[in-house]
Image (spheres, helix red, strand yellow):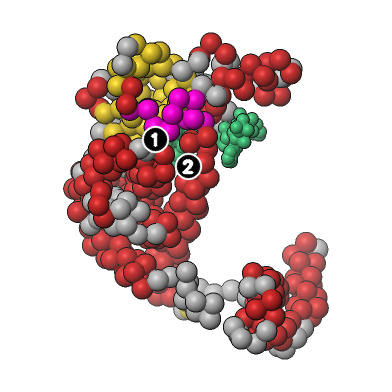
Amino acid sequence: APPLNSLDVYTEEETMLREAVQRFATDVVGPKVREMDENEQMDPAIIKGLFEQGLMGIETSAEHGGAESSFTSAIIVIEELAKVDPSVSVLCDVHNTLVNTIFRKYGTKEQQDKWLPQLASSKLGSFCLSEPASGSDAFALQTRAKKDGDSWIINGSKMWITNSYEAEIFLIFANVRPGSVQSFSRYHLDCSTRLTRAKGTKGITCFVATKDMGIQIAKKEQKLGIRASSTCTLNFDDLKIPAENIIGGEGKGYKIAIEILNEGRIGIAGQMLGLAQGAFNKAVPYTYSRSQFGRRRGKSFTKEAAMAKYWSSVVAQRVSGQAIEWAGGVGFTRETGIEKFWRDSKIGAIYEGTSNIQLQTIAKFIQKEHS
Ligand code: CAA
Ligand code: FAD
């Protein structure tokens, strides 16, 4: 952990990684973005490049061929790629934050030794939870797994699976106690149905499968956006998986899925932030150079300036006040300098017009806009 008086949010390693990903995104991904979007196809050279750059095993240990870096690093990669192409970003996101993380957190030593090196070096992964009849209601999944000697036989289908067109390793969530699962609206439950369904949830199990075991791609979606990222429906028709390919134990799949998604959602937040920054970066230089009616673009910003000053002052006080509490008693002393930020933040609500004056200015504009 950084020392208490450190102002650096990112480590030197994370900053260097950000710069390296920026270069890769601009030089390697950038020239292919348009073509990949139009063709609705990820260029295999990009996937190869991501592996070669060491971006497909960010948190994976060095022993398993990964970069042994931080969760923050994984998010930085997603964010930087999204500035140039959100499709490439989500490919990397699913592979790192969902697939690799499941092996790292829930895999046995043998499973980690077997799968993590492949995932870090060359084989793309996908996370197969959603189904035609269970998206938000993910734990009502209907894909079944039946024991057959030392193997499990999987039947069912998955829908909306990112990376699945190019992937070679699939994490499949299937129910080993399927009799008790039904698909229905949660708003029409009575107590007994609820209990029955809860039992079904507890049968959900996470299996590892490889493409050559017989995974069939039933349909590749044609989408509105992130078109270079593949999204497919997969069919499993008596898919035979060895019993040693269960991750985390029978019936533990629902917990694995949701705990991983809690982290994965931070990845998507990073992707969306990167996307916003990417659009902004492209548009702003244009607005600086574009001239119409003899002048550059520009409009009154009085209200926005008042809003920016008012809200930044609120944020400054709130964050610096919270920072003191995070540091506990030490934060209340002068030792760390955190208390100084809070003292200094007070002036933001006073000079260049108090917060009350900013609110009045904003109110005057809103009144004008609506009169
Ligand atoms: N974190 C940890 N545990 C959670 C949890 C969470 N966020 N939400 C629910 N749980 C646990 C509960 O504690 C409970 O556990 P126990 O029975 O052991 O106590 C169990 O899950 C069932 O809880 P609920 O009855 O509340 O669950 P539910 O049936 O109403 O459904 C849900 C909950 C499926 C998790 C739903 O809230 C949800 O998140 N749906 C969205 C599914 C989703 O995000 N899918 C993403 C697929 S991957 C993807 O989309 C990738 C991509 O695009 C790139
Ligand atoms: P539904 O669940 O049918 O929802 C339809 C509408 O009803 C939504 O507005 C929803 O908010 C609302 N709704 C549903 N239930 C409730 C409720 N209880 N309260 C209030 N509103 C509700 N899944 C994977 O497993 N792996 C992947 O890699 C993956 N990648 C994806 C990539 C893409 C491009 C897309 C489109 C989807 C992907 N998904 C993946 C699936 C994705 O997680 C689901 O689409 C999502 O969870 C929503 O499920 P649904 O599409 O079935 O919509």
**Label 1: which residue?**
127
Q: Residue 284: x, y in percent?
A: 44, 70
For the point 25% across and 38% down, which residue is it?
114
Write down the quadrant of residue 123 in the picture: top left
- Number of numbered discs present? 2
Q: Is the C-beta of the residue carrying label 2 under 8 Å from the nearest atom of ligand 1?
A: no
Query: Which numbered dot is residue 76?
Result: none
Where residue 314 sits, quadrant-wise, is bottom right
| Residue at 21 percent of width and 44 percent of height | 122
Disc 1 residue: CB within 8 Å of ligand 2: yes
The answer to whether residue 48 is magenta is no
Tag in front: 2 or 1:
2
The boundaries of the magenta stretch are 245-254
What residue is pinned by disc 2? 260
Instruction: Tell me residue 28's x, y (percent).
Output: 22, 58
SS for tag 1?
strand
Q: Which residue occupies the foreground of this view, 282 or 56? A: 56
Residue 272, percent across and down? 48, 53
Q: Is residue 291 left or right of residue 311?
A: left
Mark 2 vs 1: CB contact within 8 A: yes
Amino acid type, residue under disc 2 in the picture: Ile
Q: Is residue 301 visible?
A: yes
